[in-house]
């Protein structure tokens, strides 16, 4: 009986284990400001070029595991109507910082079908791309999960047509080795239990671990099997509740895995699920970014 139960649960756990962060997105109105603020806390970024939508441009911090932190701003001279129509318009114009995240897929169509079989709405794949400043053309396709704004609650799915390393490593190598990967995406939600159930339905996850962090101002849930922490505001007048009102359910912070944590100054620290999370100064950075030792 025990082995039969394990056999039934194993495929769902394997799907969760296959969810790999492709990149996370930080949005603002000006790419140079985003880069300067990140540089001010000691993290360099590389300009990646304009998107083909003629609206946004990006820079990135590429990490050794192939994931990256994307900084996205509005192209100089972009048509205001185009900006208003962008799926992340309120994040870009509101200098929201954490905005969205993407999951890397080798077989996008198979994952789309799996999610649909689990009763989760998934959009048909859409092709997109950009050109790097050195002229290298990048092409990919994406698909949105759920009915929320792209990549906010669930990740959007991305699959490359051109070599992925050309997108992740514009200099041919990681832009930093002090941080090895993106450890966690922290998503603010209106109701913690409802958010948990949505993830469990999509990825067949076990029951989460919960805790309260008064300094962060949230009830937290660590979702085993996926790199996600859900956060419900503790009070209606907190920074987290204000962010939820402005931007909806979406990433509110990102946590990096650090191989050289001693090189970086922590403005504050949290103890999450038995591990220390150090936070960069949000006043200097303009948004919340943490790191944990790996």
Image: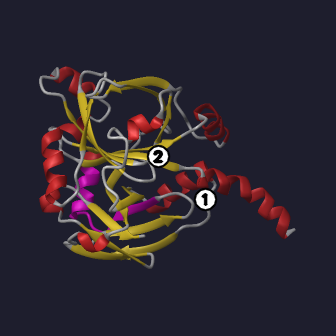
255 in relation to 147, above or below: below
- Identify the mark at residue 36; answer none if there is no mark: none
Location of residue 152 by image quarter: top left
Q: Which residue is mark 2?
A: 154
Q: Secondary structure at mark 1?
A: loop
Q: Where does the image place residue 156, in percent across and percent down from the top left? A: 46, 39
| Outermost right residue | 1
Task: Tell me where the magenta segment starts and ends, as one range.
Answer: 228-245
State whether residue 97 appears in this view: yes
Where is residue 13? Give x, y as percent: 66, 57
Location of the N terminus (image quadrant): bottom right
Image coloring type: secondary structure
- Work out how far the residue at label 2 is from the one at label 1, CA to CA, in angstroms: 14 Å
Q: Nearer the viewer, residue 128 or 62?
A: 62
Q: Was residue 229 drawn as part of the magenta stretch in this picture?
A: yes
Crowd around label 2: few <14 · some 14–19 · many ≥20 (10 Å): many
In the displayed structure, 129 sits above or below 153; it is above
Residue 215 lies in magenta, yes or no? no
SS state under label 2: loop
For image coordinates 38% across by 52% down, the residue present is 63
Locate residue 91, reporting x and y percent: 24, 41
Residue at label 1? 205
Mark 1 crowd level (few <14, some 14–19, many ≥20, 10 Å Cα): many
């Amino acid at each position: 009986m025990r082995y039969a139960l394990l056999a039934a649960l194993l495929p769902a756990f394997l799907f969760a284990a296959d969810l790999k962060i492709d990149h996370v997105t930080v949005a603002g109105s000006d790419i140079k400001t985003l880069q300067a603020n990140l540089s001010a806390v000691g993290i360099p970024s590389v300009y990646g070029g304009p998107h083909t939508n003629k609206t946004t441009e990006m820079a990135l911090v590429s990490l050794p595991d192939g994931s990256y932190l994307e900084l996205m701003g509005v192209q100089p001279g972009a048509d205001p109507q185009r900006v208003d129509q962008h799926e992340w318009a309120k994040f870009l114009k509101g200098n929201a910082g954490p905005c969205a995240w993407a999951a890397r897929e080798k077989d996008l169509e198979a994952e789309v079908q799996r999610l649909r079989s689990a009763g989760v709405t998934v959009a048909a794949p859409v092709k997109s791309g950009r050109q790097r400043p050195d002229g290298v053309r990048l092409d990919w396709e994406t698909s949105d999960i759920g009915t929320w704004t792209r990549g906010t609650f669930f990740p959007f799915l991305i699959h490359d047509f051109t070599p992925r390393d050309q997108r992740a490593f514009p200099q041919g190598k990681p832009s930093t080795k002090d941080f090895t990967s993106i450890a966690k995406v922290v998503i603010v939600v209106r109701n913690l239990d409802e958010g948990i159930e949505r993830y469990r339905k999509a990825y067949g996850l076990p029951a989460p671990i919960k805790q309260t962090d008064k300094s962060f101002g949230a009830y937290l849930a660590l979702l085993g099997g996926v790199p996600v922490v859900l956060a419900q505001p503790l009070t209606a007048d907190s920074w987290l509740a204000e962010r939820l009102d402005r931007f909806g359910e979406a990433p509110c912070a990102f946590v990096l895995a650090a191989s050289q944590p001693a090189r970086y100054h922590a403005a504050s620290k949290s103890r999450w699920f038995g591990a220390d999370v150090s936070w960069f100064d949000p006043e200097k950075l303009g948004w919340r970014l943490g790191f944990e030792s790996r």
